[in-house]
Image: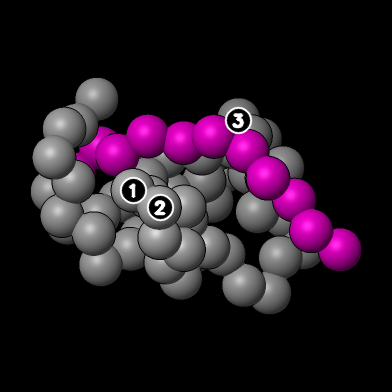
Amino acid sequence: AASSGSGFFVTNEGHIVTNFHVIENCDIAKVHYKGKEIEAEIFAVDKTNDLAIIQTNINPFKLI
């Protein structure tokens, strides 16, 4: 199974906020950034509010 969704960077350490339903049941999380596919770690989840934080090794140019 595969899933896709959107997210946005919230820290310079590569933390991305997305929806929990996007990463639910995924064994591997990947981020497409500037033409590259980068593996990410699931950092935290909140099923009740449908939120998830994933972490990459990306130092983003802009934060939300």
Q: CA distance from mark 2 to mark 1?
A: 4 Å
Q: Is residue 30 left or right of residue 15?
A: right
Relative to 22, does residue 39 appear above or below in the rendering? below
Q: Is residue 58 left or right of residue 59?
A: right
For label 3, the residue is: 49
Q: CA distance from mark 3 to mark 1?
A: 29 Å
Q: Is residue 47 visible?
A: no
Relative to 7, does residue 25 appear above or below in the rendering? below
Q: x, y percentage for residue 39?
A: 46, 70
Q: Classify 10 Å Cα crowding around label 1: few (below 14), some (14-19), many (20 and above).
A: few
Q: Residue at x 46, y 63 (%)?
A: 37
Q: Under tag 2, what secondary structure? A: loop
Q: Residue at x 13, y 48 (%)?
A: 12
Number of marks in the image? 3
Q: CA distance from mark 3 to mark 2?
A: 30 Å
Q: Quadrant of the C terminus?
A: top left
Q: Under tag 3, what secondary structure? A: loop
Q: Is residue 40 left or right of residue 64?
A: right
Q: x, y percentage for residue 26?
A: 71, 65
Q: Main secondary structure of the magenta part?
A: loop
For label 1, the residue is: 34
Magenta residues, as a range? Answer: 1-11
For label 2, the residue is: 35
In the rendered structure, does residue 10 fall within the stretch colored magenta?
Answer: yes
